[in-house]
Image (spheres, rainbow, N blue to C red):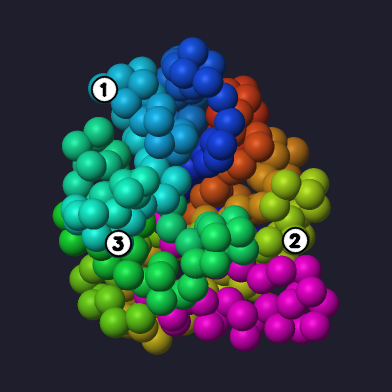
């Protein structure tokens, strides 16, 4: 096993949790512990209504701000949606796209994720594009087919220079919020598959530079084993990101010596 040569990234997806005061407090606690994680890039993705609050709390700290979703249009009559330029206006650098909950609960397709990815890249946002199989699909031996279809569909037609800016997150759906986690070997196998697919969409050199995160019940006690894998470049953290100590401990596991 060997660590990835790419700059590690650990992103916290707070999902639909917290209130404004607790969001501010959590962000401040992450900033306070930022120095202990070295060169690991930290990203906080709060609910959209708290983006400005968290952005103010992390301003100038080196911790980046990310959104959990966005529309694929720059403006217009789309009630309830949030446009990419609005996220930039609030200081966002990243946006999570195609999370399994968006796919399963709200019917987002690979084509939808592709449109959003293009819309994010256009003004300069960095999309974190999520892919991953369900438990049923894994038990049927379809993991490779499902992930291949999602990667190719979600990133179709994006030029190599733009694809180089994308972050991919592999999140086995069966491991999200269940306490289960893919073994390091299982995770590495899929990460290696994803990197090969990225090489086919662009070229080997571009693929070698794209960061691929693991998401799915990442915790301080399993992060180090995941971080030791050659193609795992960080983590997309759910529940554990709601506790600053746990989130920072996970980030420390990915720190380079």
What is the spatial separation of the Cα atoms under label 3 and label 2, in whole angstroms?
28 Å
Indicate whether residue 152 is drawn in magenta: yes
Residue linked to disc 1: 60
Residue 234 against residue 139 in the figure, above or below = above
Give the residue displayed 44% in from the left and 80% down from the top. 153
The residue segment tinted magenta is 128-155
How would you rate the neighbour count of disc 2 (Cα within 10 Å): few for under 14, some for 14-19, many for 20 or more?
Answer: many
Q: Residue 174 — which label?
A: 2
Q: Quadrant of residue 28?
A: top left
Residue 47 against residue 82 in the figure, above or below = above
Return the residue nearer the eye: 48 or 152: 48
Return the residue nearer the eye: 35 or 142: 142
Q: Residue 48: x and y, percent?
A: 40, 36
Q: Residue 72 — which label?
A: 3
Question: In the rendered structure, which disc, 1 or 3, sits on the residue that comes first in sequence?
Answer: 1
Secondary structure that dominates the magenta span: helix
What is the spatial separation of the Cα atoms under label 2 and label 1, in whole angstroms?
37 Å
Q: Residue 227 — which label?
A: none
Instruction: From the image, state whether disc 2 or disc 1 is nearer to you.
Output: 2
Question: In the rendered structure, which disc, 2 or 1, sits on the residue that comes first in sequence?
Answer: 1
Give the residue displayed 33% in from the left and 56% down from the top. 71
Indicate whether residue 207 is drawn in magenta: no
């Amino acid at each position: 096993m060997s660590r990835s040569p790419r700059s590690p990234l650990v992103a916290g997806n707070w999902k639909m949790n917290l209130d404004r005061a607790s969001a501010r407090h959590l962000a401040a606690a992450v900033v306070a512990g930022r120095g202990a994680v070295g060169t690991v890039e930290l990203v906080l993705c709060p609910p959209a209504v708290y983006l400005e609050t968290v952005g103010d709390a992390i301003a100038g700290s080196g911790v980046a701000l990310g959104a959990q979703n966005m529309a694929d249009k720059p403006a217009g009559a789309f009630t309830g949606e949030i446009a990419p330029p609005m996220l930039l206006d609030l200081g966002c650098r990243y946006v999570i796209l195609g999370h399994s909950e968006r796919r399963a609960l709200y019917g987002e397709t690979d084509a939808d994720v592709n449109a959003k990815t293009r819309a994010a890249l256009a003004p300069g946002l960095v999309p974190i594009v999520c892919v991953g199989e369900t438990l049923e699909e894994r038990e049927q031996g379809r993991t490779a087919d499902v992930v291949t279809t999602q990667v190719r569909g979600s990133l179709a037609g994006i030029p190599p220079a733009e694809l180089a800016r994308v972050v991919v997150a592999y999140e086995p759906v069966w491991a999200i919020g269940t306490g289960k986690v893919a073994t390091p070997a299982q995770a590495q196998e899929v990460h290696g598959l994803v990197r090969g697919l990225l090489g086919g969409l662009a070229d080997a050199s571009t693929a070698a530079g794209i960061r691929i995160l693991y998401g799915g019940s990442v915790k301080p006690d399993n992060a180090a084993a995941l971080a030791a894998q050659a193609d795992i470049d960080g983590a997309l953290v759910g529940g554990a990101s709601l506790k600053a100590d746990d989130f920072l401990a996970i980030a420390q596991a990915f720190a380079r010596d």
